Image (cartoon, rainbow, N blue to C red):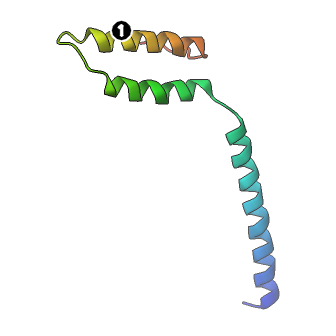
Amino acid sequence: MRSWQLHGALEELIKAIREVEAVVETMRAEHDPLASHIFISRSRYRNVNNTKGGKRRQMNARLSFNTACEVRFRGSL
């Protein structure tokens, strides 16, 4: 490979890396409340001490679903 070809390929790679970095920064700036809620609620669901009948987890799941609906979730159980 000739040096000018390598230089051209490196220039294109640098441009591509800058584009990717710009897209990643844009994604970091945008906050997705539904994704945050899902991440937090899964962690809480796993860590809750449950009762024999499962009422505590059932109540937490229902409250989590209600919160998800408030932040734009349009699915169903």
**Image vertical order of residue 13 relative to residue 66, above or below:** below
Q: Quadrant of the C terminus?
A: top left
Mark 1 secondary-structure assignment: helix
Write down the quadrant of residue 3 in the picture.
bottom right
- At horizontal 68% and vertical 41% (from top left) the residue drawn is 28
User: Does residue 29 appear in this view?
Assistant: yes
Which of the pair 18/60 is nearer the observer? 60
- At horizontal 49% and vertical 26% (from top left) the residue drawn is 38
Q: Position of residue 54 (x, y in %)?
A: 24, 12
The outermost residue toward the left is: 52
Write down the quadrant of residue 10 in the picture.
bottom right
- Is 47 left, or right, of 14 in this rendering? left
- Is 64 left, or right, of 70 in this rendering? left
- Is 32 left, or right, of 40 in this rendering? right
Q: Mark 1: which amino acid?
A: Met
Which of the pair 11/1 is nearer the observer? 11
Q: Quadrant of the N terminus?
A: bottom right
Callout 1 crowding tier (Cα within 10 Å): few <14, some 14–19, many ≥20: few
The outermost residue toward the bottom is: 2
- At horizontal 78% and vertical 69% (from top left) the residue drawn is 12
Q: Which residue is mark 1?
A: 59
Which of the pair 46/1 is nearer the observer? 46
Q: Position of residue 43 (x, y in %)?
A: 40, 29
- At horizontal 55% and vertical 28% (from top left) the residue drawn is 36
User: Does residue 76 appear in this view?
Assistant: no
